[in-house]
Amino acid sequence: MNFLATVAIIAIAGSGLMSQEQEQAQTPVQRFNAAKAELEKYFANAQYKETVKLLEGIIPAEVPEVKKDEQDPNVLVRSLIELGFFQDMHSNLGRALVMSGNIEQSIESFQKAKSIAELKLKGTEGFLNLQMQGWEQSIEHSKKRLADIETLMKTKAELEAKNRRNSEERKQLEVLKENTLSLEYEASVCKDNITKGPQAIAQMSDLLKKEREDSTKWSPVIAGLEETLKNEREMISSPSFGGDKAKYVASVIDTKTNLDEQPTREDKIKFLNRLAFLDPNNKTVQQQLALVVGNS
């Protein structure tokens, strides 16, 4: 997951049996985190329909709004983290749907992940831009203030070096001596800001870059799936098949090279699941699917 979503601040229920009432009381994010091990097992075992069912039981109909509090920026941070988890939910659901053969519905899930990523970017961008602006102002102020402090400390040293001081100089030296500790502390803070500020800005800039990349990565995925559907529909509606999905599936599966050309076991399962989605009654597809899934 992208920025902020990697920061685990949400409490997850411990192991052990849980009553139905307690389970219902969990938030979607808590339920998603608690189900991660099971989801990983389902994906590893090519149990994509079970994955879809599990995720659909977790994901609520509505995406939470971005929450903000001008007095507490952590409210926005927590809200963005929550959105990151919702993005992951829809991303996992989209992947499971593609693998199960339901490309049409997978596009909807990836579009939701895309919209959440864009919403998250908008909130993150505003938050980080304010933080970076604050650091830039702090660095500039610290540089000016540090120069002023260095001038004052130089003046103090010069006055102390004098053998004779007039009344005004004695008063000035007395004030400087009284404020030496506070000036030294302030100088330390200024130096800290000047040193750490650029590092903080660089880190936030990098996080913002990753968020922007995250918000744009969904469009090519969606476009690729839409192109796949378009080509498939054109083939099915061609004179060779006349809109008959079963005839199309039979032709595809009976051409042995179509399956052999799929590079990985996962690709073969995805390929066969799509054919099974188009024609659940094709026995050859079901037989091949059983063979491929069984060869772990």
Image (spheres, helix red, strand yellow):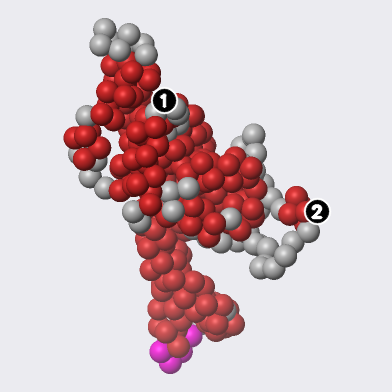
Classify mark 1: helix, strand or loop.
helix
Magenta-tinted stretch: 161-165
Q: Nearer the viewer, residue 86 or 65?
A: 86
Q: Who's the residue at 54% across and 45% down the image? A: 50
Q: Is 126 placed left or right of 44 in the picture?
A: right
Q: Residues within 10 Å of mark 2 (few under 14, many from 20)?
A: few
Looking at the image, can residue 218 be seen? no
Q: Is 284 placed left or right of 135 in the picture?
A: left
Q: Who's the residue at 20% across and 39% down the image? A: 261
Q: Judge depth for marks 1 and 2 and give the one in front.
A: 1
| Chief SS of the magenta region | loop
Pointer 2 residue = 21
The earlier-in-sequence mark between 1 and 2 is 2
**Distance from the alpha carbon under mark 1 to that under mark 2:** 40 Å
> Which mark, by number, is residue 87?
none
Relative image position of residue 277 (x, y in whole percent): 44, 29
Q: Nearer the viewer, residue 217 or 196?
A: 217
Quadrant where the image shows the C terminus: bottom left
Pointer 1 residue = 278
Q: Is residue 93 above or below residue 42?
A: above
Q: Who's the residue at 22% across and 29% down the image? A: 255
Looking at the image, can residue 287 be seen? yes
| Tags 1 and 2 touching, CB below 8 Å | no
Relative image position of residue 164 (x, y in whole percent): 46, 89
Q: Determine if the magenta segment contains residue 192.
A: no
Amino acid marked by disc 1:
Leu
Amino acid marked by disc 2:
Glu
Q: Is residue 50 above or below residue 249?
A: below
